[in-house]
Image: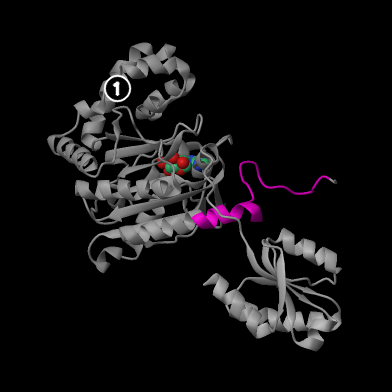
Amino acid sequence: MAQPTFSTHVGMVDILPDEVRKWHKLEQIIHQEAKKFHFEEIRTPIMEQTELIARGVGEGTDIVSKEMFAFERGEDQYVLRPECTAPVARAFVEHHLEQRGGTQNLYYIGPMFRAEKPQKGRQRQFHQFGAEIIGADDPAADVDIIAFMMAIYDRVGISNTTLKINSVGEPESRKEYIEALKDYFRPHLDKLSSISQKRFENNPLRILDSKEEEDQSFIEDAPVITDFLTEETAEHYQRVKELLTELDISFEEDPHLVRGLDYYTRTAFELISPDLGSQDALGGGGRYDLLIEEIGGQHTPAVGFAAGMERLFIACQELDINLVEEEMLDVYIVTLGEEARKWGLEHLPKLRAAGLSASMDYIGRSIKSQMKDADRENARHVIIVGGNELAEGKFTLRNMKASEEDSYTFDKILDKLTTDIN
Ligand code: AMP
């Protein structure tokens, strides 16, 4: 085969027809669970102003400092969105969604873009589903967000996960903590990985996120943020844990859990799967009480999560979870001769109008290859139409699974097939 002239960019993949059905199924599960939890979908553009992401996600983060697909056009600076919380927060402020009253419970599904080094579970264009509760500072909102996320994995059948939680405090307590962390790491700086040495300068919290072997023993003994929380935040965290226990959602406290985005305050969480290899996070989230103010809105507490769809599919594969049943075609019309073809073209819309999925040959293939085609398309039934059938007004209906056939009028066939699907 000749080498194709064009290909996708590295880290970006086509989702081909054979795979797309599992995406539909997952999307369907997300929409259904969202309905149960009373979340409304929001769709924002895939491009945002660079400044929104820089301010929202944080200049010191990996995402903003090195992973943005950003470009200029005239005066405007665009970025392909690397995540969707800042865009949703922007939409909330821009459209005064608070005027709709109550909390805004929003969810989204869509592609995100980060110029990371591609590997298993890490792409440059990937997909997330996620949700936000905007306008509530009660711990019940944190727990509802977590419950919504977990419900989706439950429905899919991924259950051997670990929910890790932590409280990352507010700016004041975090500032104090970061100082303590720096004091702790400073004497060991030359023994830390080069990535962590860099992070020591721009974002010391992220040292705790390091996967580098040489950092692990230092991380283990590092001070924990939970020792620095204000009384109010400590109480909030305590209440989140109590509510999770009441809802039977098991969790592990991880006092070193920090997230790669700067906007988090108080509750932070991550859902980990042992089936994912080194990129083991299925999803994560937390509270971001200051983000909306940071991007120009009123002070509005909020909490959300985002989860990777490709990683969910990797976990499914490892666990042998098949998200889709085999796609069946209800009926395929096999025709012999020009008249029969005409009949087929006239009757195809009638089958479809009755709610059946129906197809036929368009390119004048032999009966044998039409039967093969029907097989390939997983047809449950085949209607065979030739000169005799047209003369008699009765057509052969073949049940492909049972390998049985009989002759009926078209009306009778329609009747039989529609009873079958109902
Ligand atoms: P984050 O927005 O970084 O908290 O990521 C939330 C989730 O999105 C992660 O837990 C992953 O499941 C998924 N994710 C993040 N970055 C990528 C990527 N580059 N490729 C695939 N999935 C990703």
Q: Which residues are magenta?
A: 3-25
Rate crowding at label 1 as few (under 14), some (14 to 19) or many (20 or more) other CA atoms within 10 Å: many
Q: Closest to the observer: 103 or 244?
A: 244
- The quarter holding residue 261 reads top left
- Which secondary structure class fits the magenta region best? loop
Q: Was residue 246 drawn as part of the magenta stretch in this picture?
A: no
Q: Residue at x 48, y 50 (%)?
A: 81
SS assignment at label 1: helix
The residue under the point 65% across, 41% down is: 10
Q: Image quarter for residue 9?
A: top right
Can residue 352 be seen here?
A: yes
Residue placed most toward the observer, 209 or 419? 419
As displayed, is residue 43 above or below residue 177? Answer: below
Amino acid type of disc 1?
Leu
Left or right, residue 209 beside residue 133: right
Residue 207 picture location, percent across and down: 39, 25
Apparent side of residue 365 relative to residue 235 in the rendered image (left or right): right
Q: Looking at the picture, tell me which residue is in the foreground, 282 or 67.
A: 282
Q: Position of residue 284 (x, y in %)?
A: 38, 41
